[in-house]
Image: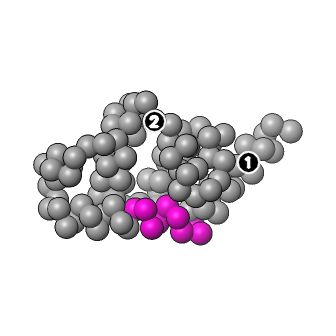
């Protein structure tokens, strides 16, 4: 069980990333998407973003990560910014292209 599955058991990672990037990410396997996030986000950013998307309150996030409120806000802001950046979007587009190529 990865971090996303622990804090977001009923939410599909592809749908969340699809909303943020405007790409049809539902087609990609969750494991592949999570691996891409792990490559581009720091551990702190990834952990805070995943927990926040799962509805975990900031106090609990701080307790589990050892971060203060300001550090959590910074990590969340940086994670959202990185997810929307062209560098990660292009990787997602390559993943989608590879999936389409496999289907043909």
Horizontal and vertical percent position of residue 64: 17, 46
Do we see residue 19 in this rendering? yes
- CB under 8 Å between discs 2 and 1: no
For mark 1, give the secondary structure: helix
Distance, label 2 to label 1, CA atoms, is 24 Å
Q: Does the magenta stretch include residue 42?
A: no
User: In this picture, which residue range is highlighted in magenta?
Assistant: 79-87
Do we see residue 64 in this rendering? no
Foreground of the two, 36 or 72: 72
For mark 2, give the secondary structure: loop
Horizontal and vertical percent position of residue 99: 73, 43
Quarter holding the C terminus is top right
Give the residue drawn at x 78%, y 39%: 102
Tally of numbered discs: 2
Report whether 5 appears left or right of 89: left
Residue where numbered disc 2 is placed: 11
Report whether 102 appears left or right of 15: right
Label 1 crowd (10 A; few <14 / some 14-19 / many >=20): few
Report whether 26 appears left or right of 1: right
Q: Above or below — where is 11 with respect to 75?
A: above
The image quadrant that residue 1 belongs to is top left
Give the residue drawn at x 24%, y 61%: 72
């Amino acid at each position: 069980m990865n971090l996303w599955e622990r804090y977001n058991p009923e939410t599909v990672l592809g749908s969340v990333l699809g909303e943020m990037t405007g790409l049809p990410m539902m087609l990609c396997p969750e494991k592949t998407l999570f691996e891409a996030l792990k490559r581009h986000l720091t551990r702190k950013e990834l952990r805070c973003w995943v927990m926040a998307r799962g509805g975990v309150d900031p106090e609990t996030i701080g307790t589990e990560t050892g971060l203060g409120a300001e550090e959590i806000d910074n990590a969340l802001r940086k994670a959202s910014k990185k997810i929307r950046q062209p560098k990660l979007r292009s990787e997602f587009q390559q993943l989608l292209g590879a999936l389409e190529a496999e289907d043909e």
